[in-house]
Image: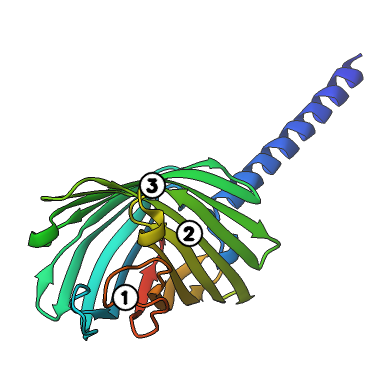
Amino acid sequence: MRRSIMLASLCAGAALASFTHTARANDDDQEDYPLQYAQRPLTLHAQSLEPYVSADITRFVADPKAAQRDVATNLTIQGGAKFGITRQLEVDASLAQIQVLPKLAYGNPTLGATFGLISSAFELGFRGKITIVTASATAGMIAEPSVPMAVHIGKSVRLDFGAGLPVTIAKGSPTLVGLDLPVAFALNLVDTLHAGAQTSVYIVDVKSPGTSVTVPLGFFAGFTIGTEHPILEIDPFFTWPKFTQPGATDPAAQKLNLDVYTAGLALRGYAFF
């Protein structure tokens, strides 16, 4: 009898130890933020910080209402950070946005938060973002609730897409409700190097979708320094923000805009607490 009780106790103890070890291993796996970009979740892991700084040069039409298409240059430097409060909740802020050219100015700070609802090979979440527009002529804000989604295909392929409803409130102008449908495809060429392309269908005002729709086109890449998880990442990018405007009616607008572009570089750091 005693031998039976002892044997049962040993078996139960072994099962409990095995279960505990497996649970801890799974927890450790969940807390490991992947080095490969294609495997990263929609939100940062709990108690992790991602500070970033970026600089970009934008060529834009100086006066869209003018008949002559004069192109000017804008140089902007911005910084911010993302912080994972829990595994499902991430907040981010971009506060230091400094325009260097054509004239020195500070503008358009952004605050946002993302909550993950489904976390697996297919991810779904809810994101809220508010941008304060500080330019005196168009002062106001843009509030955008959105539903981001991601599909992880194997260990090297990632597809991001979603739907957002940007609401633009500007001084002296009617409130506009738009539609944003972004899509991005990324591929990890090796564990530390990824590249991809992105686009979207952006409608400024859903009441006049034909004349306010813009389809940008961009390319991005990233080189990651790290071992089990990223420590530093260097991200160059290039975008035609108004690649095509099928229904544009402005005199300076073109159906295909290759001379209006943004090129830049971002540096991202990662700290895990």
Between 200 and 99, the one nearer to me in the picture: 200
Q: Earlier in the sequence, mark 3 or mark 2?
A: 3
Residue farthest to the top? 1
The residue that disc 3 covers is 165
Which secondary structure, mark 3?
A: loop
Q: Earlier in the sequence, mark 1 or mark 2?
A: 2
The residue lying at 85 percent from left, 18 percent from top is: 5
- Amino acid carrying label 1: it is Ala
Residue 133's image quarter?
bottom left
Mark 3 and mark 2: Cα distance apart in space: 12 Å
Compared across the picture, whether 213 is left or right of 40 comes to left
- Amino acid carrying label 3: it is Leu
The residue that disc 1 covers is 253
- Pointer 2: residues within 10 angstroms few (<14), some, or many (20+)? some
Q: In the rendering, at what x and y percent does residue 185 appear?
A: 57, 67
Which secondary structure, mark 2?
A: strand
Q: In the rendering, at what x and y percent does residue 1 appear?
A: 92, 13
- Amino acid carrying label 2: it is Pro
Up/down of 90 relative to 190, above or below: above
Q: Please report contact status of discs 3 and 2: CB closer than 8 Å, yes or no.
A: no
The residue lying at 35 percent from left, 56 percent from top is: 82
**Mark number, residue 148:** none
Between 210 and 141, the one nearer to me in the picture: 210
Up/down of 266 relative to 161, above or below: below
Q: In the rendering, at what x and y percent does residue 89 appear?
A: 42, 43
**Mark number, residue 182:** 2
Q: Please report contact status of discs 1 and 2: CB closer than 8 Å, yes or no.
A: no
Compared across the picture, whether 147 is left or right of 186 comes to left
Up/down of 57 relative to 158, above or below: below
Mark 1 and mark 3: Cα distance apart in space: 24 Å
